Amino acid sequence: MKSFLLPFGLLISVFGYGQKIFSEGTIVYQVSTSVHGQPLQSDVKSFQQIKGSHTKVDLVSSVGKTTTIFNSREGEGAILQEYGAQKIMVPVTKENIQSRNSKFDHVVFEYLAETKNILQYNCTKAIATLADGTQLEVFFSKELLTDNTDIGFQFGKLPGLALEFTSKLGERTVTYTATSINFEPVPIQNFDLPTSGYRLLNYDESQKKR
C-alpha cells in the first residue's frame, strides 16, 4: 500500500489570527477506498508522527502494516513492511525519497470557493494537478501551518495543512480524512529503526518487486 507523507506537530508559536505553526505531534487519518462508488475497504488507518526533522508514517490494515521512518536532516530512514510472517526492511536515502516522490515536483494548485469544517478547522478546497495530468482533491486549513515543508512533499506548497485528500485511479477512489490531531510530544524512540527481525532488501530491488 502507498501512503502520503504529511507534516504535523506540536504548537510552538502563533502569528496572525488563528494561525498555528506545528513541529511535533500525531495525526490520524481514516483511509476509505471505493470502486464504482461502492465501498471496498474501510479498516485502513494512517498514523503520522513528526518530531522536528523526524517523520514516521504507519499505514495499518487488517492484513498488515507499512511504516516509513525518515530523518530529513540526516537524509536517511527505512520502509518497513509487515504482512503475515513476512517482515522486510528497505533502507532509504534522501535521493530514494526524492525519486519516489518526483511526480509531485511540479504540482499546480487551483483554489476553489468550496469549504468544509474538519476537526473544527475551517478548510478550503484545492485541486492539485501533477505533471502527468493526475488530479487530487484537497481540503486544507490555513489555520494550521508547518515549518517543515520537506516532509509534506505533495502538499508543501499549500498555504496550510491538508486534512482531507482524495485520489482517483480509474474507477478506484481513495480518500484520507483526518479524524484526530494530538499535540502531545512524540518520544524520539518512536523513530528508531529496528536492528533485527527484518529481512533487508535494497531500494532498487524493492522497486523491481512492485
Image (cartoon, rainbow, N blue to C red):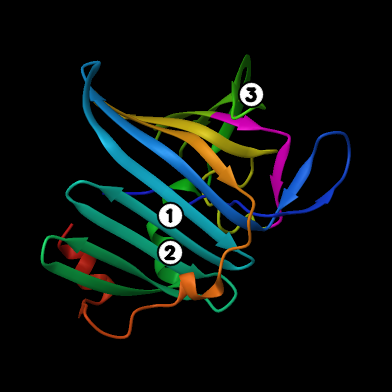
Give SS at disc 3.
strand
| Magenta region | 139-147
The residue wearing badge 3 is 124
- Estimate how packed mark 1 is, as few (under 14), some (14 to 19) or many (20 or more) residues with alpha carbons within 10 Å: some
Which amino acid, by three-letter code, is at mark 2? Ile
- Estimate how packed mark 3 is, as few (under 14), some (14 to 19) or many (20 or more) residues with alpha carbons within 10 Å: many
Residue 171 vs 192, above or below: the answer is above
Percent x, y of residue 84? 12, 60
**Magenta stretch prevailing secondary structure:** strand
At 50% from the left and 31% from the top, the residue drawn is 164
Instruction: Please say if the residues under marks 3 and 2 sit with CB atoms less than 8 Å apart.
Output: no
**Which image quadrant is residue 166 in?**
top left
Residue 162 located left or right of residue 165: right
**Which image quadrant is residue 10 in?**
bottom right
Residue 140 vs 147, above or below: the answer is above
Q: CA distance from mark 3 to mark 2?
A: 28 Å
Residue 81 located left or right of residue 189: left
Is residue 144 on the magenta stretch?
yes
The residue wearing badge 1 is 101
At 30% from the left and 41% from the top, the residue drawn is 44
Extreme-bottom residue of the structure: 195
Q: CA distance from mark 3 to mark 1?
A: 24 Å
Percent x, y of residue 193? 39, 78
